[in-house]
């Protein structure tokens, strides 16, 4: 039987973390290619505005909005760009939002970083609720910044009783509006929503507060190799978690389930 053809686009433009972009390109190809014919590439805001997402040669499209900073996403995509993304999902494709991309996919954002605050509405609004972070209880009271002290390994609890250790760096928990319709895939240790999914028209979305996409070789290149001597030990510990052969697999399995639901 011929495998279904899927295009995976990873957003790579102002605000997108190079670590997250390169990792998503690598792990999406590795985790999803066994069951589908996968074409993985980057996409810019200009590409989106030029309707590159409208590819009728593929059975399904997946847009991954990676970690980084979501205000530049707003700057480049507010208005027509977000209308195109919403239409892309509504007509039967997938949106995967990771960390900043998770904030971006909610109706609103409430974010506290070290020395700054970002709040406001977001146009995609796939999730009827607010993405709230950073979660300083995971990082010994340290709000998000680029320092090692705002990074952590945390354990997710899944609805099927599975658990998973993952990398956290400034991500959200997802607080639903009253009567919001969505599914909780995983919660943090405090019981708050860490990874959620839902439907939008004929398509679906997944929003994650954690970096399940990370690739160990790329993390070693971008984080460990560039770390200060004082940070090497902790960065090496983080890398050891990401190196686990099943790292991120539970969330990628959910993405496969979403793919199958759309394609069935």
Image: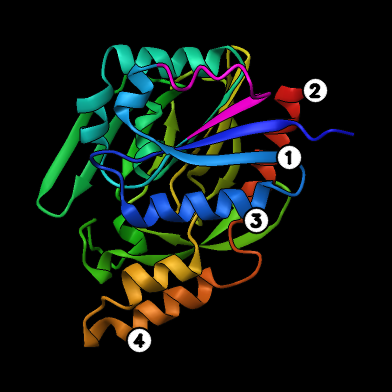
Mark closest to the chain's N terminus, 4 or 3 = 4
Query: Is 106 located above or below residue 159 in the figure?
Result: above
From the top left corner, tell me how far across and down residue 76 is, in percent.
23, 26
Q: Secondary structure at mark 1?
A: loop
Res 158 seen here: no
Task: Examine the image and state in which quarter residue 140 appears.
Answer: bottom left
- The residue indicated by pointer 3 is 249
Looking at the image, how many numbered discs can be counted on the residues? 4
| Label number found at residue 264 | 2
**Which class describes the residues within 10 Å of circle 3: few (<14), some (14-19), or many (20+)?**
some
The nearer-to-camera label among 3 and 1 is 1
| Magenta-tinted stretch | 51-63
Q: CA distance from mark 4 to mark 2?
A: 47 Å
Residue, far right: 1
| Label number found at residue 233 | 4
- The residue indicated by pointer 1 is 36
From the top left corner, tell me how far across and down residue 182 is, in percent.
58, 26
């Amino acid at each position: 039987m011929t495998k279904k053809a899927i295009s995976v686009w990873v957003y790579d433009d102002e605000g997108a973390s190079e670590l997250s972009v390169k990792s998503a390109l690598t792990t999406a190809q590795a985790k999803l290619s066994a069951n589908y014919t996968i074409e993985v590439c980057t996409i810019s805001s200009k590409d989106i505005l030029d309707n590159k997402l409208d590819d009728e040669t593929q059975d399904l499209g997946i847009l991954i909005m990676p970690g980084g900073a979501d205000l530049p996403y707003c700057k480049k995509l507010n208005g027509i760009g977000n209308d195109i993304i919403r239409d892309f999902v509504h007509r039967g494709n997938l949106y995967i939002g990771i960390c900043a991309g998770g904030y971006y996919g909610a109706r609103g954002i409430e974010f506290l970083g070290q020395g700054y605050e970002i709040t406001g509405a977001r146009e995609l609004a796939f999730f009827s609720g607010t993405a709230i972070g950073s979660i300083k209880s995971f990082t010994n009271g340290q709000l998000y910044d680029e320092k090692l002290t705002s990074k952590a390994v945390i354990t997710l609890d899944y609805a099927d009783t599975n658990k998973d250790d993952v990398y956290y760096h400034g991500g959200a928990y997802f607080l639903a509006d009253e009567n919001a319709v969505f599914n909780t895939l995983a919660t943090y240790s405090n019981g708050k929503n860490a990874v959620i999914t839902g439907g939008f028209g004929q398509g679906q979305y997944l929003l994650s507060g954690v970096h399940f996409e990370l690739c160990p070789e790329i993390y070693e290149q971008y984080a460990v190799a560039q770390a200060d001597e004082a940070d090497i030990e902790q960065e090496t510990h983080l890398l050891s978690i990401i190196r686990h052969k099943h790292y991120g697999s539970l969330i990628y399995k959910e993405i496969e389930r979403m793919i199958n639901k759309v394609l069935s």
